[in-house]
Structures are given as C-alpha cells and as structure tokens.
Amino acid sequence: MLYFLSFLFFFFQTEGKISVENQWIRNAGKGMNTAFFADVKNISSKTDTLFKVASSLAKLVQIHETYEENGMMGMREVGNLEIKSGQTLQLKPRSYHVMLIGLKKDLKEDQIGEVTLFFKHAGAVKVKAKVKNMIK
Amino acid sequence: MKYFLLTLISLVFVSCQSKFPEKEFVGNSSESLCNQDSVMVDFPKKFNGKILLVSFIFTNCPDICPLTTHNLQLIQQKVKEEKIGNVSLAAISFDPERDSPSVLKKFAEVRNLNLSNYNLFSGKRENIKSLMETFHIVAIANDTTFTEDGDPVYFFTHTDRITLVDQDLNIRKSYRGSEINLEEIISDIKNLRD
C-alpha cells in the first residue's frame, strides 16, 4: 500500500490549483548544470503565473528557455510564464525548463530531487522528481 | 522502351547521388586533441579507415548537448545491435578551459557512456577553433553571470549538429544533433560501409 501511495505521489502531485505530472531531472555531475522538466497544469478557474523557482540541489535556479535562431541553439532566462485556466505548461527538452546551475552534488539515475515552483495565485508548489538519463 | 530505360538509369543515378550530398575532405586539417583518459589523438586522422560520427558540445550545457551525446549513445547501441563494425563516435568540447579530461571523464561516468568506441575530446583552444572551422561549427559565449559564491556562469549559443565522416575522412552528411532520425543515420552508415 505504501509503495502504491508513493507511486501516486511521484507521478501526480497536486497542490492547490496546480498539478504537476511527468516530472524528472536530467542526471549530471557535481558542479555541472542540468534541468528539471514537468507538465505543469493550471486546474484553477483563473490564469496563474510561474514567476520563480528554487531548489537546494543547485547554487542558482532559474526559468530558462532553449531557442533556435539562424540554425543555432541557445538558452536564455525568461521571466514570468503565464498558464491559462485548464492549460498545461510543458517544461521539456528543447523548450522551457527549470535550470539548475552549479549542482551541489552528483545527480545520478533514480535519485530523488526536490524543486519548488512559485505561482502568483497557487503559491509555492514543492515537487519531488526522479533523476533520469533521458525519457525512454 | 528507350525512353523508359533512360528514365530508369537517370533515376538510379539521381538516387545514388542524393544519398550523400556532401563530400568534403577533412584529413588535411588534423589537430592534436586530448581524450577523457588524457590520451593525445591526432583528430580526425586517427580515425582514418573508420566511419566517424562527430559532434561539438560543452558539458555545462543543460539541454541540447546532453541530448546530442545521448543520441550518439543511441547510434552506438544500434550499431552494436546490428553488428556493424568499424564505427567510432566523438564529442569535442568547444569549452576546453572548463572541460578538462577529468571533467569529460566525470561527464561520461554520470551518464554511463560506453567509451569503447566513443571518445570525448578537449584540447588547446587554437586546435579546437581550427577543427570547428573545418567542421563548420559556431559557438558564441553568452554574457557571464555569477552565483552567490562568485562562480562564473556562462553558456553558448551553438551549432546543433552530428557530422558523418567516411572511411577516407570526407564529411558526407550532417544531421541535427539534439533530434535525430536513428534509422536514417544507421542506413547512411550501412551505405558507407557497402
């Protein structure tokens, strides 16, 4: 029963008006940078905004996007990300993601890390995520 | 009948030509690089006689370069499954000041990379710059910011590419690095081998 509840906890975390699913962190070594990915759904009746991210895993945590310009790939920090009622913000490879800059320890496959997402209305949403190499 | 045969011959000719649109010899611009085990290698000359897949990366990249190195891993696995011999893979860092051999080794260990025919390379800035020109790679460092500890943080805007090099050190085809069609690449490798 405990395993079943843990399974539900990791695969469907809902806090208030935001649900977070399919969350994972890409594996990387201490001192390096990596990213947190998830499907963030606004299940409230009004638009909400992701405006800050935090985690004790890294020295610096930011909301970033990967972009393509003139055949080159780059990354930049983005400010607020608005999520309309009923819509899902996909934090995914080659797109928006939570940047974990300067990891304080190795993140190896199957470890669990925690990231907090801050929303204007829903407040702080803590998310536990499994470390993976890639989505298989 | 004559027209049919001419059309058929033309189609076969066009089909053979379009398999590999590029043929650019890169053997004249070989440079000394250092792999994850601190072994010096004359690149790409060392791989003369092999089919080589090359990408340029930096290990502090959180998104595109891990996808590219993972895709090289997928190619490596598929090549092994299909028992295709004589294939090597290389990821060259365009951030050699941070990507020392020990950093490259750690990068490989965390990702469980099989290094039997897969090398991660660092080297002198001027050697890497020369190879980037040869392989038509651009990497531009972005502005530097600092963590609370004062550690500098910077990233690159860069070309996203895996390049296929034949046994005679000719570039034959380029693919996007972070998003690949595995079947296409394997088919191209088989065509080069035949």
Image (cartoon, rainbow, N blue to C red):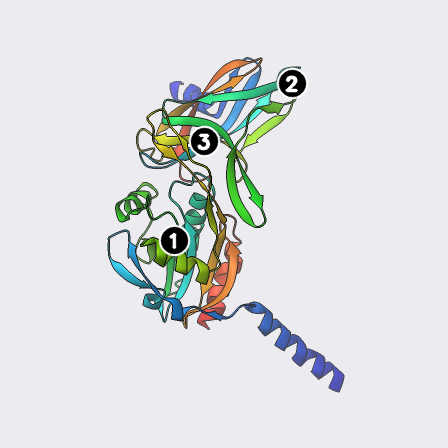
Pointer 1: what residue? B91
Chain of the residue under the numbered disc 2 shown in the image? A
- On residue B56, the disc is none
At x 37%, y 68%, the residue is B50
Q: Secondary structure at mark 1?
A: strand
Q: Which residue is mark 2?
A: A47
Could one spot residue B47 in this view of the protein?
Answer: yes
- Would you say A12 lies left or right of B100 here? right
Real-space Cα distance between discs 3 and 1? 23 Å
Element at label 3: strand
Residue B151 rendering spot, x and y as whole percentages: 34, 31
Residue B130 on image: x %, y %: 40, 60
Give left or right: position of B175 versus B102.
right
Q: Residues within 10 Å of mark 3 (few under 14, many from 20)?
A: many
Would residue A110 be visible to someone looking at this image? Answer: no
Q: Is residue A42 above or below residue B98?
A: above
